[in-house]
Image (cartoon, helix red, strand yellow):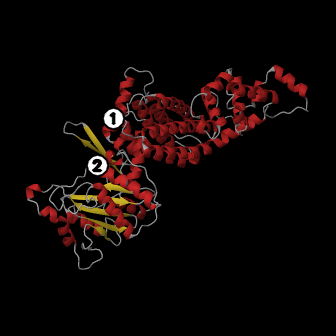
Amino acid sequence: MIPRVHKRGTRTIGLLYYLYGPGTHEEHVDPHLVAAWDSLAPDPGRDPQATYTELQKLLDQPVEALAPCRRPAQHVWHLSVRAAPEDPVLSDEQWGEIARRMVAATGIAPNGDAAACRWAAVRHADDHIHIIATLVREDGRRPRLNNDAGRAQAEARLIEAEYGLKRLNTGDGTAAQRPTSAERHKAERQQRERTPREELRETVRRAVAGATGEREFFDRLASAGLLIRRRIAPSGDLLGYTVALPDDRNKDGEPIFYSGSRLAPDLSLPRIRERWSADDHQASGSVGAPSRTAPGAPSTARRGTASAAWQALIVIEDGDDAAAAAHIASAGEVLDALAKTSAAHTRTQLREAAVAFERASRSHVRAERGHDRALRQAARDLVLSGPALGRGEDGATTAMAIDMLFFLVTAAMHWHAKKGHAQQAAAARQAAEHLRAAYQAAATQPLGALYQRGRRLGHPLLQRQTAVLRKAVPELAEQVLAEPGWYALAATLADAEAAGHDTTTLLAHAAGRRELDTAESVSDVLVWRLRRSADLPADTSNAVSADHRTVRPADRAGRQAQGRTGPRHGRS
């Protein structure tokens, strides 16, 4: 249940006309009172003798009783309360009780207060009500409305529990503005998948991902097909921007523009500039600042993403709050960039992950920009490298990147949970589930190829990799050996050995670094960590079998001695 305190107004009759009227797009159906300060209050929706003016005069009576100099400039209070889409349709009686609880909780009409403000609750749709009140009490005093929005949220949580409704998390004021009911109804009539506000928010986020300045940012918006207006000061300085979809127009045929701040708090021009200024500061004298080099291959960008995500994971778990918040915010940029450049079979889940994580990227912990430049560079490299193929090295390194981003998002979820950021933690959890699905789609082919190569390893070589596993990670060995992915890990260990690495040290280092307890398959995680840290090809579909490349002379002699009677595959 979502309560929303709207901006205060000056005209009671104007709001009544809207609540009882047809709505901006004929979306209001059967508007009528479900509760009011007085059970005999007139209802213009159901009583043909009642008028809007009659109800307005009664609501405004305490205001009009004051001398003009004592009347509040904005005396109209407005609260909407909306049920979740999956909630059952509530009756008028239930909505009436909810309205009474809301005006009591917010301070409009506390329980047992005979001199409280006058109010009325109007229902014109199945899923929500609007409460209008005038902000002068019967005794001429003003109501105490400190933190009315927060108190409405707290009461909503109690109502959800008592009515068996969907339990939502309490917000902290950092969420993006939700589409209005008028925007949703318009999108439905136009058969849009999302409202223009939501579509614009995603497009602007993607334009920000890895951008290094205003020119690049606005070029990306234009390339995406948006209409752009810039707000220029008399001095010529750019103050802000608004964007619109070319086909989203009002009744006069004019495009409907949204400012960045109306799309999301961190999409205002000043907040976006914070990212660029941090980049410029770091670039002035720091190693690792975002580069302006030519784009590389998609697979290279994805490897870089996995490495940057790994380092960010360490910061989120062990760094200070400001640096952690910066890395979490930039993780959103990486998800946006990866979704924008993903192949068809992973695109939907990656896009949903990016949309979900948007809510997790902001909190009241102010991000200290600059520390996150490696992630922002990774996002930039993804965008500049362009779309990746869903197969070969591109597809395999996509699985590698998604695997590491899953753990980064999971770390963000734990961080938010520790801080009491309920909405952000829930959003990160949802993003992780979408990343899990995207990973399964991306990893099937490359892990399948590694699995087949592992199954073909000769018995001595497989025994040697088993010994490495038991020596490097004795606490995980039996679990890994029981997983189907063990053969893929064995093939990877064989490749690392052939490349000259100390596989025992390499494996111990990979397993000793965080977050294996949330993995569905430990062997899968270790495969990608090893292939990234050892700089091994991610795709081995056309590789020569490892047992032909890495069998030592002693092993070959042992195999010949075994003859045809010895087992060629197995785990010891």
* 202 sits left or right of 394 in the view: left
Mark carried by residue 345: none
Q: Horizontal and vertical percent for residue 364? A: 36, 39
Q: Which residue sits at x=61%, y=31%?
A: 529
Dot 2: what SS? loop
Which is nearer the eye, 543 or 488? Answer: 488
Q: Eyeballing the image, is 395 above or below 88?
A: above
Indicate the position of residue 292 as horizontal and vertical percent values: 43, 28
For the point 41% across and 60% down, which residue is it?
83
What's the residue type where badge 2 is placed?
Answer: Asn
Q: Residues within 10 Å of mark 2 (few under 14, many from 20)?
A: few
Give the residue type that dot 1 points to: Arg
Q: Please report the residue visible at 65 percent of the width from the left and 39 percent of the height from the top.
A: 521
**In this figure, which residue is indicated by the disc labeled 1?**
273
Task: Identify which residue, 78 or 292, lies in the foreground.
Answer: 78
Vertically, is 376 above or below 86? above
Q: Residue at x 15, y 55 (%)?
A: 72
Residue extending furthest bottom? 49
Q: Assign a secondary structure to mark 1.
A: helix
Observer able to see residue 129? yes
Using the rendered view, name the quadrant where residue 480 is placed: top right
The picture places residue 42, in percent across and down from the top left corner, at 24, 74
Please name which of the two marks, 1 or 2, marks the residue nearer to the observer. 2
- Vertical placement of residue 39 versus 346, above or below: below
Q: How many marks?
A: 2
Sequence-wise, the earlier of marks 1 and 2 is 2
Looking at the picture, how far across and down is residue 467, in whole percent? Answer: 75, 26
Quadrant placement of the C terminus: top right
Res. 245 visible in picture: no
Image-based side of 28 in relation to 15, left or right? right
Q: Which mark is residue 147?
A: 2
